[in-house]
Amino acid sequence: MTQRSFLDRLASLDTNTVSDALDFLNLPGATYGLRPLWDCPKVVGRASTIQLGPKGDAKPTVHLISPVIDAIASDDRVLVVAGGAEGISCWGDILANAAVSKQVRGTVIDGLSRDIEGSESVSYPVYGRGVTMISARNRVIQIHSCQPVQMAGVTVHEDDYVIADRCGTVFVPAARIEEVLDLGERIAKRQDGMVAAVRAGRSVAEVMHDKEFEAIVVKG
């Protein structure tokens, strides 16, 4: 199956369902606290990882994240930015405009954004911990990219899958994506049936019994 098909299938799910699938498979990936920073749409794509860190001297440097955006060569990327500092921005409207021009799907930052209205004005999705007005300039630099990073306690590798919506952000290991999608689709189908059963008058205690959830994995 092609990577595009995986992305289409992932886009048909939500973070709640993908998180449940990861739980059943005993995989990490669901995070807490990385939420939309404006009323932006769901984001689904593949991770371009970036590690930030404190700047140790006063020498001029290339602005953080900009080299990664310049190098983007496909339309399936989500920027995954780790190492944000407390109170300091690691995303802004100029970067958002550059990302739009390169057809980046969105940015997830384990940190803060400034100029959030600028990202919203170009309909660029940004997920993270919050907003600030304090610039990263002379405070934060890019340490590396395309290497594993820690996002809210989850290790994310280059090319892992990303889904983010109003409930938060989930990362799926690339090597397990088909397995997670297969199970996620079964979960979604079973839960739709549960909703229909409750609406039809069936006891919610019966519908939501643990055995019903366990049957998702056992029976499909």
Image (tube, helix red, strand yellow):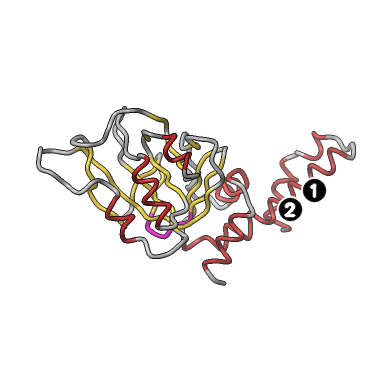
Q: Secondary structure at mark 1?
A: helix
Kind of residue sitting beneath label 1: Gly
Q: Nearer the viewer, residue 160 or 91?
A: 91
Numbered badge on residue 193: 1
x 33%, y 28%: residue: 133
Which quadrant of the view contains residue 69? Answer: bottom left
Numbered badge on residue 108: none
x 35%, y 46%: residue: 95
Q: Nearer the viewer, residue 77 or 209?
A: 77
Q: CA distance from mark 2 to mark 1?
A: 6 Å
Spot occupied by residue 5 in the image (x, y as percentages of width and height): 58, 66
Is there a contact, CB below 8 Å, between mark 2 and mark 1?
A: yes
Spot occupied by residue 25 in the image (x, y as percentages of width and height): 56, 53
Range shown magenta: 157-161
> In this rendering, would 98 be left or right of 171?
left
Label 1, residues with CA under 10 Å away: few <14, some 14-19, many ≥20: few
Residue furthest right in the image:
201
Q: Nearer the viewer, residue 178 or 1?
A: 1
- Quarter of the figure that contains the C terminus: bottom right
Q: Main secondary structure of the magenta part?
A: loop
Spot occupied by residue 187 in the image (x, y as percentages of width and height): 68, 51
x 52%, y 45%: residue: 164
> In the rendered image, which residue does mark 2 sit on?
189
Q: Residue 132 in magenta?
A: no
- Quarter of the figure that contains the N terminus: bottom right
Say if 203 sits above or below 163 in the image: above
> In this rendering, would 81 be left or right of 76?
left
